[in-house]
Image (cartoon, rainbow, N blue to C red):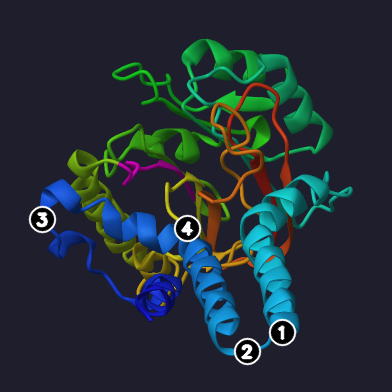
Amino acid sequence: MFLLALGVGWMTAPVWGVFTDRVPETGSWIVPFLQSAWPVGLALLVAALAALVWLTLSRRAAVGATVAAVVVCTATVLVPGALSRVAQKMPEEKDADTVRILSVNTWYHQASDEFLAQTAREMDADIVVLPESSDVQASAVADATDLELLQPVSTRTRGGGTALLVRETWMTEAAAESVADLHLTRHQNPVVELENLTMMGVHTNAPAHSHLVDGWVTEMADLRDWASGVDGPLVMAGDFNSTTAHPELRRLAGRSAEMTDCGGGLFAAPTWPRAGTPSPVPVLRLDHILVRGLMCQDSGVVGVRGSDHAGIWADLRV
């Protein structure tokens, strides 16, 4: 019964609400971990039910329940990641009313500059966000495309740089004057006011360590407050280090800021980890393109050589 209760509690972690900032700092990472890993709770629940069947029903029923448990437990971990690799696709040709966004965490700027530029060029991206980039890498992408790097990429920490590149022809004098780093997150936080929308590049703290959780909670709240005060169409793209299972992200993408997670959701193709960890497939969707005032027309994920994240893209209708 304990395993059943634990499975139910863990599986329902995404609906607990915002408890993260109420847990003592030493254990504060546990809540976001349990929420992001809710499929493990489902697997635990199924395994506990299978064990209960072995204790109470016939051997034939027990064998069937065990097989079902193995299938479900495997599916909750492996299927989402496998689907994200199978679901990789490049967008189709776009029309003049479509804004195409590409976001790639470059994993401490280890992703191939050439591959990033080729991907942006082939998909005809209008805006590119590169968390964990470098000035050298972002400049190389800009030089190989018709995109303009809006500000020097921060070097204050190894992964602190977030590059924001925009189609050169969109950078009017007014747009250029609006470029800023809002410092709402630990990492570089570039923003620009374009003619048809406001665009922000995002990279937040990762709530995987106790000393970073409070900062993550604060950053998500600050992003939500800022977004709520922006007039007109708004796009926020990058590595939020959050999944839809985290109420902090749902509050940002929910009623208070009225944002839509284009291509996201609890069962969306995960983006991390694709490299650098023992996990054979990605299991979490940490990267998002949040939109307000524009219609999400299409979206997808793309593998990126040298990064532990999949890239994400979205077609937005003006």
Pointer 3 and pointer 1: residues touching (CB < 8 Å)? no
Badge 1 is on which residue?
A: 61
Label 2 – label 3 distance at C-alpha: 43 Å
The location of residue 156, given as percent across then percent down, is: 29, 18
Label 1 – label 2 distance at C-alpha: 6 Å
Residue at the image point whose x is 62% and y is 21% from the top = 111
Badge 4 is on which residue?
A: 243
Mark 2 or mark 3: whose residue is earlier in sequence: 3
- Which label sits on residue 24? 3
Label 3 – label 4 distance at C-alpha: 22 Å
The type of residue carrying mark 4 is: Thr
The residue carrying pointer 4 sits among few (fewer than 14), some (14 to 19) or many (20 or more) residues within 10 Å by Cα, namely: many
Q: Is residue 206 magenta?
A: yes
Mark 3 or mark 4: whose residue is earlier in sequence: 3
The residue carrying pointer 1 sits among few (fewer than 14), some (14 to 19) or many (20 or more) residues within 10 Å by Cα, namely: some
The type of residue carrying mark 1 is: Ala
Q: Nearer the viewer, mark 1 or mark 4?
A: 1
**287 or 281: nearer the eye?**
281
Badge 2 is on which residue?
A: 57
Q: Nearer the viewer, mark 3 or mark 1?
A: 1
Question: Which image quarter: residue 32?
Answer: bottom left
The type of residue carrying mark 3 is: Pro
Quadrant of image for the N terminus: bottom left
The location of residue 181, given as percent across then percent down, is: 33, 35
